[in-house]
Image (cartoon, rainbow, N blue to C red):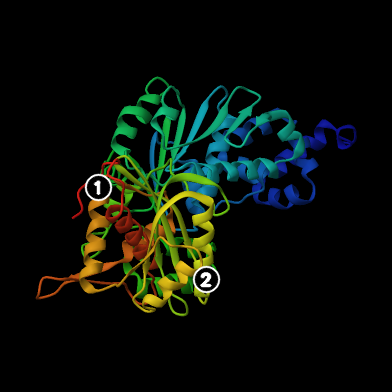
Amino acid sequence: MSLNHQLTWEDRRKIAEYLMRFPEKALRIHRRAPELIVQALRVEEFFKAVIRDPILFSHILLGFKPTWYQEELLRCRSKRILVRWPRQSGKTKALAVYALWYAFSHPKTTTLIIGPCRRQSIILSDMIHGLIASMPFEVRRDFIRRSLRTTIYLSHGSRIVSLPNSEHLLRGYTAHLIIVDEASFFPNDETLFLNVLLPMLATTNGTMIVSSTAWGKNSMFYTLNMDERWTKLHITWRDALKAGIYTEEFVDEILRLRENQPNIYRTEFEVEFIEDEDTWLSQDLLAKACDGELTYYPFDSQQRGTFYIGVDLGERVDHSVVAVVDRRPNRLELVHMHRFPLGTSLASVIGYVKTLRDRWDRVVSVYVDKTKHGDYIIEDFHEAGVPEAVGINFTLQKKQEMAQLMKQRMQEGILRIPYDRQLLDELNVERYQLTKAGHIVFSHPEGTHDDRFWALALAVYAAETIRPWSIPMGKVA
């Protein structure tokens, strides 16, 4: 580097002293003249100070200024830390900075990042890759030995490994730092924490950071929040607003959510544990139905299985939704979910289903909500080349039957769904009320949608109504 010959040791020391006194100035220098930071790091005392202090590390090496609550996490030296922050408050970035700083400052250590599914753990891993890319080139060259999508190797022997919630993948590791993200959505959470994760730290006296939305009370995340031995870092959306994280437009969305969907508002932005007494599918039930190893099949892929499709038709006011379940022995797996934009023509929806039918071997039946459109819509499906289409009228009794069946299959552990936060929120939004006649009436709050709820209910109902008896399944309710 050219400045290596131009700056004296005294020059480097002065730069280092300046950055130590005014670390916030490093943000501008990091952007405009990163070579000056590299020169300052050649002063050994300064380099050690930067590696030792996560805030200096963040300012000087990453060019990132944490908020006060992100600093609180980065400076926390507890061995057991719980993080309950609202959506879009900078949690992922703070966890990524912590993981990277720990790996830099602790040679020959293993950091594990674990999410409820591969996609969630990759989100945090990708954030770490982005932080590494923001470092001065010389720092990356000297410290990053090898960088893969799920594993980062540092030159001094440390590594950062991202893994999904899979006991067979996790067993065998000894860890010094474990970061568990969205812990409320681990269906096997008690076994995972007590039998797999905590034993990993036994010989290293390592640190565990557990973060999540406050989703449900029948979870280890809730249990740990009641444990006085854990350090709890809890903020609300108002803290993020004061820190300058949220825009006015986003605050307007939060306030609308408070008005229309108070339960989601309280769990996502107040980060409170709540009782969802009037919801048909509780948060705890939905969390237990999540399978971290399940992912949606892409629309343009070729698949083999025993598929059942549910189609909830909307058009102008409501979305049209296609849900596909794959029936396996004693198991139903949600493998595809597509919600069309408002205003999508019914012809486009039919064409979508026809393409799935032709690509995937084999589609056994397609249950379609014909309440608004009558038998004509089923004739359109048949004429388009979907002879498996069956029309279902959404009468009070039929909706009750389908909803009860879907809930029962979740309770039995038969119906499994991928970790998909938008889907979980929509499934949790459906409300119910008992009438004097003993019937169940379903509804959803104004401003919300339940199209995915009923598309999935149709697919499950189809799988239980028309099935080869060679594959056993639970009894229909």
Q: Is residue 39 left or right of residue 452?
A: right
Give the class, few, some or many, for how many residues have Cα within 10 Å of label 1's Cα (few <14, many ≥20): some
Q: Quadrant of residue 269?
A: bottom left
Viewport quadrant of the N terminus:
top right
Q: Is residue 253 left or right of residue 401?
A: right
273 or 387, which is in the foreground?
387
Tell how many labels. Answer: 2
Residue position for label 2: 341
Q: Residue 320: x percent and y percent?
A: 45, 70
Q: Residue 41: x percent and y percent?
A: 72, 34
Q: Quadrant of residue 203?
A: top left
Mark number, residue 218: 1
| Residue at image point 42% right, 32% down | 207
Of circles 1 and 2, the one toward us is 2
SS under mark 1: loop
In the orientation shown, which residue stands out farthest toward the top? Answer: 203
